[in-house]
Amino acid sequence: MLDLLENQKRLTANQWKIAGAATLGDMLDFFDFFLIGFVLAFVVKEWNLTYGQSGAILLASGVSAPFGSSLYGWMADKVGRRTALITAVLNVSLATAAMALTPEGGWLYLVTCRFIVGFGVTGLYSVDITLMQEFSPAHKRGWFTGLTTTMLPAGQLLAALLGAFAAPYIGWRGMVAVGLAPALLCLYIRAFVPESPHCCAGAVWKRRKERSPGLCRSIPRRSLCRRCPLRSSKRVGSRFSNTRAASSPAA
């Protein structure tokens, strides 16, 4: 069944919706990531922060970022790309919004929130790249995946515009509260982004291999996510197996 994806000539409307979710997600991801630089400009003098304290606030997300990639990559393999993507979005947006509750002079609280943000920033990027690759045919995979990075600078631009024009009215706490907005992306993901067909097919194949080792069988359409592009195709019956399974006699 997965060869239907590889033989695609044109991208479908559903695939463009998935690309929209990934591209918008990365843009808002980097909006939250860069927002702290503009927030810090408002609190450095007010809190009398030292260079070391300011540096710790800015560095915290970078320290946790490598672990976030590993954590959410593992999660995507265990519970599915879609669930991991939603969790990463909530990770970034909730941790950013939590900074609005920072007590006066509470730079350690900011460090903690930014450390948590770092997990989600790289986690979201890692998962949506995987999702884009698994929803695109090989001859469009590089271009389609690269599309997700096109709006990254826009995230930083939004943070700068918020600091320049909105901060005088809503203050720095209002700025970080706006960081909760990306959580709305979860509604879009739930509505338009299905689970990866590779993830669905892999789960089905694993269960069948455990029940009947060595058997190679077709993946039924009903086993895929209801919104999976391959589920609605009329051409069903491709093999999803490893080389050894393909050489085994059919049951």
Image: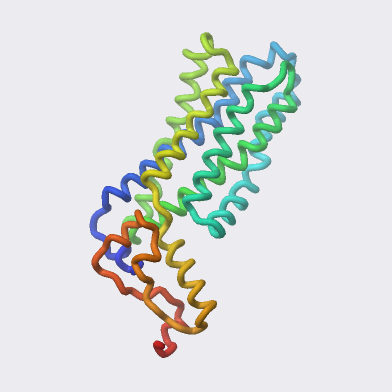
- Extreme residue in the bottom direction: 249
Q: Which of 31 and 177 is in front in this view?
A: 177
| Residue 164: % across, % down | 49, 14
Give residue 100's quadrant in the image: top right
Quarter holding the N terminus is bottom left
| Residue 181: % across, % down | 48, 29
- Residue 66 visible (yes or no): yes
Above or below: residue 203 compared with residue 187: below
Give residue 231's quadrant in the image: bottom left
Q: Nearer the viewer, residue 122 or 229?
A: 229
Q: Which residue is drawn at 53% across and 29% down?
A: 180
Q: Residue at x 55, y 29 (%)?
A: 34
Visual colour scheme: rainbow
- Residue 22 visible (yes or no): no
Q: In screen coordinates, is 120 left or right of 242?
A: right
Q: Which residue is drawn at 41% across and 55% down?
A: 133
- Extreme residue in the top direction: 168
Quarter holding the C terminus is bottom left
Above or below: residue 55 compared with residue 223: above
Give residue 115's quadrant in the image: top right
- Total of numbered circles in the picture? 0
Above or below: residue 77 compared with residue 193: below
| Residue 195: % across, % down | 43, 55
Above or below: residue 40 compared with residue 201: above
| Residue 37: % across, % down | 59, 24
Q: Nearer the viewer, residue 34 or 229?
A: 229
